[in-house]
Structure formats: C-alpha cells, structure tokens
Amino acid sequence: MKIRWGRAFAGALAAEIAQIAAAFVWVAIYSYLINPGQPLAAYEAHAQASGPWVSVLAGAPIFYAASRWIAKSLPTALALFAIFFVIDGALLVSMTESWTGAPVVLIGLSYLTKLGACALGGRHG
C-alpha cells in the first residue's frame, strides 16, 4: 500500500492540536475544580509536571482516532506517527530546560503508546 502524505500530515496536525488541547483542559479542570485559588505559578508548575502524564493517557485514544479516521491505513498511520515524532520531538527539545530521569521515561512511554495506537488505528482504518 502507498502512503497518503496529505492524510498523514493532516492526522499529525490534528493529533498535535488535540494533545495540546487535552493538556489545557486538564490544567483548567485542576485549577477550577480540584485545586482552585492558588497563585498562577502553582498552576504553571502543575502544567509542567502533569504534561507528560496527560500525553501518555490522552495520547493513545487521540492517535488511535487520528490513525483510524484520518490516516485510514497502516502505512499512512505510521507516516502520521513519524511526522508527529519529528515535529513534537523538535518542540520538546526546544522547550525543555533540563532533562531528568522520570520525564525521559514518561516521554519514551508516551511515544511508544502513540506508536502502538497509530499501528492499531491504521489496521482498523
């Protein structure tokens, strides 16, 4: 099968936007419902700490859906993941000030779950 690059780019973009939206939604829930009344710095710190977890937990369904309904084939879904990996990796490296062991493990877990979700979604597409 051939790779449909337009679908792969569209899926990668949609998944990246959905990931960012999921992170914003989580911090909003945290700041308004779970721990309201804190200074802005507390919410910024929480966003930094929870971001990798949100990526792992929300990433699998987001990438499954993008691969199944946008990519619609395994080769295109894997191309979607590769495009996302390059873009997200570049953003991650440019925005990360210091690397510690735990976030690196979570980042690796996040990419692995997304790759698995893309493969599964591509097969089901």
Image (tube, helix red, strand yellow):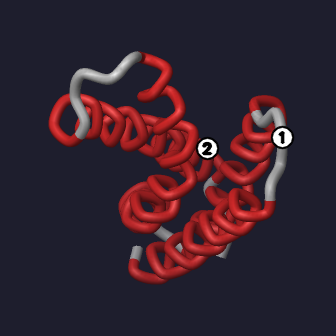
Q: Nearer the viewer, residue 100 or 120?
A: 100
State whether residue 51 is above or below residue 111: above
The residue at 30%/37% (across/down) is: 25
Mark 1 closeness class: few <14, some 14–19, many ≥20 residues within 10 Å: few
Kindly give the residue lying farthest to the top in the view shown: 40
Tag of residue 116: none
Which picture quadrant has residue 40? top left
- The x, y position of residue 97, in whole percent, is 82, 33
Kindly check if marks 2 and 1 are in contact, taking CB atoms under 8 A apart as contact.
Answer: no
- The x, y position of residue 111, in whole percent, is 66, 65
Q: Nearer the viewer, residue 124 or 46?
A: 46
Which residue is under mark 1? 98
Instruction: Indicate left or right for 108 with 117 as reference.
Output: right
Q: Amino acid at mark 2?
A: Phe
Kindly give the residue lying farthest to the front in the view shown: 38
Q: Amino acid at mark 1?
A: Ser
Q: Nearer the viewer, residue 28 or 71?
A: 28
Which picture quadrant has residue 37? top left
Instruction: Indicate left or right for 81 with 41 as reference.
Output: right
Q: Nearer the viewer, residue 23 or 43?
A: 43
Which picture quadrant has residue 92? top right
The residue at 38%/33% (across/down) is: 24
Which residue is under mark 2? 9
Quote the CA–CA distance across marks 2 and 1: 30 Å
The residue at 28%/31% (across/down) is: 31
State whether residue 119 is above or below residue 101: below
